Amino acid sequence: MAGGHRLLLENARQVVLVCARGERFLARDALRSLAVLEDASLVVGIDGFIKAIGPGDAIQKQFSEETFQERIDCTGKCILPGLVDAHTHPVWAGERVHEFAMKLAGATYMDIHQAGGGINFTVERTRQASEEALFSSFRQRLGCMMRAGTTLAECKSGYGLNLETELKMLRVIERARRELDIGISATYCGAHSVPKGKTATEAADDIINNHLPKLKELGRNGEIHVDNIDVFCEKGVFDLDSTRRILQSGKDIGLQINFHGDELHPMKAAELGVELGAKAISHLEEVSDEGIAAMAAARCSAVLLPTTAYMLRLKQPRARKMLDEGVIVALGSDFNPNAYCFSMPMVMHLACVNMRMSMPEALAAATINAAYALGKSHTHGSLEVGKQGDLIIINSSSHNLENPKQNYLSLGLPWWRSGWESACRCRGHGFEPWSRRIPHAAGQLGP
Ligand SMILES: N=CN[C@@H](CCC(=O)O)C(=O)O
Ligand SMILES: [Zn+2]
């Protein structure tokens, strides 16, 4: 149908805006209660952006003469922003189920890594895999994420380590960005592990002298778009000095710094991230008090990954201290061969139970604050006029009910998908891939 609007969501019991005043993130007292409209409707335009949100009767009056490609009756339901997954490793070949048995028998993540398993096992399999096979499994994984409510995911390379395979992974991510109905923030993670036969210094030199110039060239030609640069800053992987050199070189070619820090050992990675102007640091199980204070002051977001601490039986990151000190806390699934979770609702559930976050804190961390960690909170992460129409509808009259049967967070069920799947409609369930097919809009608001 020509003209008119793309979508009308009518008469929802609640529209959970998350925030309503153009906030780029939520911290401290702003997390006590999120912006919610009762008995409201929402309009998405042909360009995929939100045109109006307001009381159901007012929207009906305002748009009474207008046409819509699709109308959804949301009576008794609740509309939320699409969930944002701020940390995933979704492009790889080769399962690592055998390592789960080793971990159950007492081996640590680093024991396996140092014995040539872990990331380096996946690197070997990913180097051997064809681009087509990698794309095919990646597409399936993104489909699972969408069915669990994710509409924007950060996706890392990092199972290639050599230039050839890192580029293969980034091409796969680029293809998904162009072809699939999910938003993607692409991260170059060529410093995910030190490749066999090289020292960390040699690997850093290769990245700085060969990988990053190539990425710059491909970005300029419009062949591959990369948003972020990542390093696994860890004892026995990349030390502070190599991490600093790589991240600074990435920043010099225009990438946002968003890296793995203070996970297994206290490294002062948070302090380094603040010094370099990082947008986000992930993990932080071992962050120092000074690192937390520095991140709060610098508005450097903490991407917490509850599945990792659970899987590896690590100590939990100190979410409460971070929140109380004003750090911008975001969440990610950390989907990877070692932590096989697609579901952000499950991640939010673990954050509430194991990290003692409140439900509003978990929802903000999986929407506006995760979008902030990816430099996209001006377009994503809340339901506000002018933002992307990325949203989910849940079959519940409130996002914050006491009744566990009706609350997706207390259920944690989406781990098995069924509860969420029947309750959720997102772009993958028939909505348009909003931004990608509308070139002028994408140009205005970024990729
Ligand atoms: N810590 C480093 N990277 C991943 C694990 C990747 C893997 O084990 O393949 C993480 O974030 O948990
Ligand atoms: Zn990771």
Image (cartoon, rainbow, N blue to C red):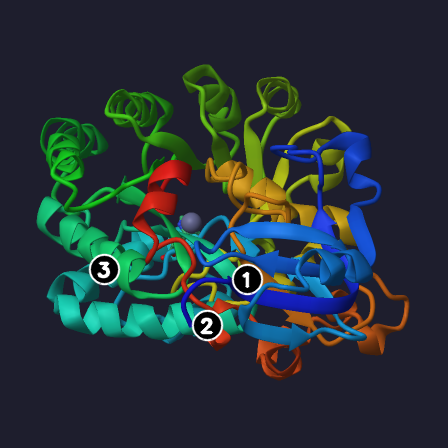
Question: Mark 2–mark 3 contact, CB under 8 Å?
Answer: no
Question: Mark 1–mark 2 contact, CB under 8 Å?
Answer: no
Q: Which mark is residue 311?
A: 1
Cβ of mark 1 under 8 A from ligand 1? no
Residue 303 higher or lower than 78, as above or below: above
Q: Position of residue 80 (x, y in %)?
A: 67, 59
Could you tell me the amino acid type at mark 3? Arg
The residue at 42%/35% (across/down) is 258
Q: CA distance from mark 1 to mark 3?
A: 31 Å
Looking at the rendered structure, the secondary structure element under dot 3 is helix
Residue 335 higher or lower than 237, as above or below: below
The residue at 61%/43% (across/down) is 368
Asked if residue 349 can be seen in this view, the reply is: no
Q: Which mark is residue 428?
A: 2
Give the mark toward the camera: 1 or 2. 2
Asked if residue 154 can be seen in this view, the reply is: yes
Question: Mark 1–mark 3 contact, CB under 8 Å?
Answer: no
Choose between 121 and 44: the one closer to the eye: 44
Residue at the limit of the structure toward the front, as seen here: 65
Q: Residues within 10 Å of mark 2 (few under 14, many from 20)?
A: many
The residue at 12%/30% (across/down) is 213
Residue 48 higher or lower than 19, as above or below: below
Q: Earlier in the sequence, mark 1 or mark 3?
A: 3
Q: Earlier in the sequence, mark 2 or mark 3?
A: 3
Could you tell me the amino acid type at mark 2? Gly
The residue at 74%/46% (across/down) is 361
Is residue 111 found left or right of 37 in the rendered image?
A: left
Q: Position of residue 191 (x, y in %)?
A: 27, 39
Q: CA distance from mark 1 to mark 2?
A: 29 Å
**Disc 3: which residue:** 175
Q: Earlier in the sequence, mark 1 or mark 2?
A: 1
Q: Position of residue 76 (x, y in %)?
A: 81, 75
